[in-house]
Amino acid sequence: MKAVFDESYLYIRIESSTELPTPGSTIGKPPGGWPVLKIDTSDAGEFVLYDAVNIGDQATFDEHGRANSHRPFAAYSIRLERNGHEVFSSSADLHPSPLVEVAGRDYDIRIPLATMGIMDSHATRMTIGDAQWPKSAVVSIAVQRYAH
Amino acid sequence: MADMRVLAVILLTLNTGCAQSEQSKVEAVLKQVEHAEQTGDFNAWARLWVPEKSGDLEKMRPYLRARPEVQYRAMKTFVQGDQAVLLVHAALDSFVTMTLRREGGQWKIQDQIWRDTAPDANSVYAWCPPSQACLRAPDRLGSRSLLQEWIPARRFARDGR
């Protein structure tokens, strides 16, 4: 996993060991196993980021309104929470999302800093870890700020 | 130097005034939605939406009845260029997030999502991310080019892991 932030976004890239199905493509078993992430910020406190690949269902219907075919598809979703309450969620499935993108082995997420209440990131410090953070067992990153 | 400061203040005031004006226009759309639903005026209601929704909206025609009790209250309005987001309190446990698009100088509803809990006020910045069109605006969402735009490889060059 990699992460960096600039004046507008926190960018997170989760790299899979295998090729990821593109959003909306037909799948059998969803990839995953990524940890729930905790994002600790110096300005705005702690957030929890859920990222997952779910299986969506695209159905067709007969003239009686009964489903007569189903197609399971890859639906990538993120959900940012603070104190157990949703800040926002977004998904890339049959519709694209500017906040979630998947290409090759990369699952890219970007979080507008303003959603975390960070309007000026010049002095912001950020750490991302797994759900056990600060006793992270899987991943812990001091996120660097990218200056243009 | 003093003249420059005066000019800066005037420009800032004008800019703020424009933003407030657009915010008022967006909220005026909500008032029109409210009035159309209170009176059951389907045509007035449908005219408030972007043209590409007209097919879907027409299916709603038989169901739009006058509901005088309808009241919408804007909780937060965020305008960014030709895109806007409205967080609306519709009833006791009913909230709606509306995205709007300005077309030919007029604000039109692009999409709406209902929920039974109050949305976070900062969620508007996810609906209209910085320097991006609002969600569900497919014309701005080229896939590969978008990725290359938002995560240039060099941004990770100094990453620790």
Image (cartoon, coloured by chain):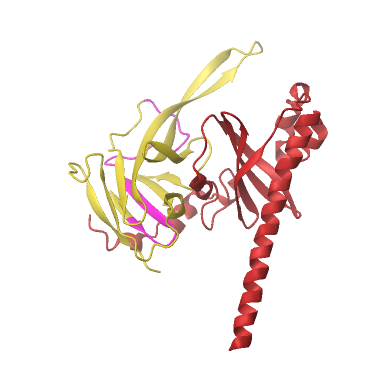
Chain colours: A yellow, B red
| Magenta-colored stretch includes residue A26 | yes
Residue at point 63%, 52% (across, down)? B83
Question: Would residue B49 be visible to someone looking at this image?
Answer: no
Question: Would residue A132 be visible to someone looking at this image?
Answer: yes
- Could you tell whether B108 is left or right of B39 in the image? left
Residue at point 59%, 29% (across, down)? B92
- Give the image location of residue A47, x and y in percent: 35, 45
Residue A82: quarter of image: top left
Residue at point 45%, 37% (across, down)? A23
Q: Quadrant of the N terminus of chain B?
A: bottom right
- Give the image location of residue A3, x and y in percent: 32, 53
Which sits in the foreground, A27 or B71? B71
Question: Residue extending furthest top?
Answer: A64
Which sits in the foreground, B14 or A64? B14
Q: Which residues are magenta?
A: A4-28
- Give the image location of residue B122, x and y in percent: 49, 48
Question: Residue extending furthest bottom?
Answer: B1
- Could you tell whether B8 is left or right of A24 in the image? right
Total numbered labels: 0
- Give the image location of residue A100, x and y in percent: 44, 44
Does residue A66 lie above or below A138 as drawn?
above
Does residue B86 lie above or below A26 as drawn?
below
Does residue A59 lie above or below A142 as drawn?
above
Which sits in the foreground, A9 or A67? A9
Residue B67: quarter of image: top right
- Could you tell whether B75 is left or right of A2 in the image? right
Q: Quadrant of the C terminus of chain B?
A: bottom left
Does residue B133 lie above or below B34 as drawn?
below
Look at the magenta stretch and give its main secondary structure.
loop
| Magenta-colored stretch includes residue B144 | no
